[in-house]
């Protein structure tokens, strides 16, 4: 196993909850949902990790439990933290809504027949292809 998430330990090849660090994870989620910043929530929970690690902890679905990891956080708390994280990012302008490109019709103002002659030199071929371009009469 490459990385065991904070809050778990491996005993005899099985992931089990480490009570002390699991309580810190729960406190992290609750402190963040109470309005504290990532750093302040981590400080209140007693977790000494960098900002990005704390952010990843709030999005780690393993805390919900799966085939290997027992649950630490309930689904409602996890979804609330996810929604709060998105809300804060949007308030800070870190999420931009995608703008649909306008459908624009490109009108071809020229035409060219298929080249009949093929040259070995690509530059000569390009010159020949460009020489075939015709502009339609308006």
Image: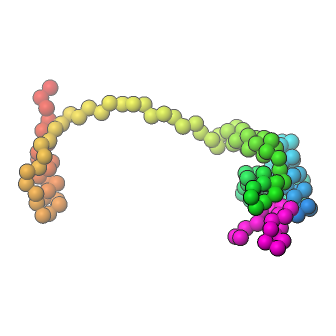
Residue at screen point 76% across, 66% down: 4
Residue 35 in the image: above or below residue 14: above
Q: Which residue is at the front of the view, 100 or 7?
A: 7
Asked if the magenta segment contains residue 14, the reply would be yes
Residues drawn in magenta: 1-17
Residue extending furthest toward the left = 117
Lateral position of residue 53 relative to residue 26, left or right: left
Quadrant of the image containing the C terminus: top left
> Residue 112 at what x, y percent from top left?
14, 41
Lateral position of residue 107 relative to residue 133, left or right: right
Residue 79 in the image: above or below residue 71: above
> Is residue 128 shown to the viewer in this render?
yes
Residue 114 in the image: above or below residue 102: below
> Residue 67 at what x, y percent from top left?
74, 58
Lateral position of residue 135 relative to residue 53, left or right: left
Asked if the magenta segment contains residue 38, the reply would be no
> Is residue 88 shown to the viewer in this render?
no
The image quadrant of residue 121 is bottom left
The image quadrant of residue 77 is top right
Q: Which residue is at the front of the view, 108 or 57?
A: 57
């Amino acid at each position: 196993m490459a990385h065991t998430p904070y809050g778990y330990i491996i005993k005899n090849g099985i992931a089990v909850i480490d009570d002390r660090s699991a309580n810190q994870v729960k406190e992290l989620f609750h402190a963040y949902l109470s309005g504290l910043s990532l750093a302040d929530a981590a400080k209140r929970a007693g977790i000494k990790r960098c900002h990005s690690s704390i952010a990843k902890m709030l999005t780690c679905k393993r805390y919900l439990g799966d085939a290997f990891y027992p649950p630490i956080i309930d689904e409602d708390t996890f979804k609330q933290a996810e929604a709060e994280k998105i809300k804060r990012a949007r308030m800070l302008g870190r999420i931009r809504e995608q703008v649909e490109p306008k459908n624009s019709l490109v009108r071809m103002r020229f035409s060219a027949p298929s080249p009949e002659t093929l040259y070995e030199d690509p530059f000569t071929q390009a010159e020949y292809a460009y020489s075939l371009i015709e502009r339609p009469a308006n």
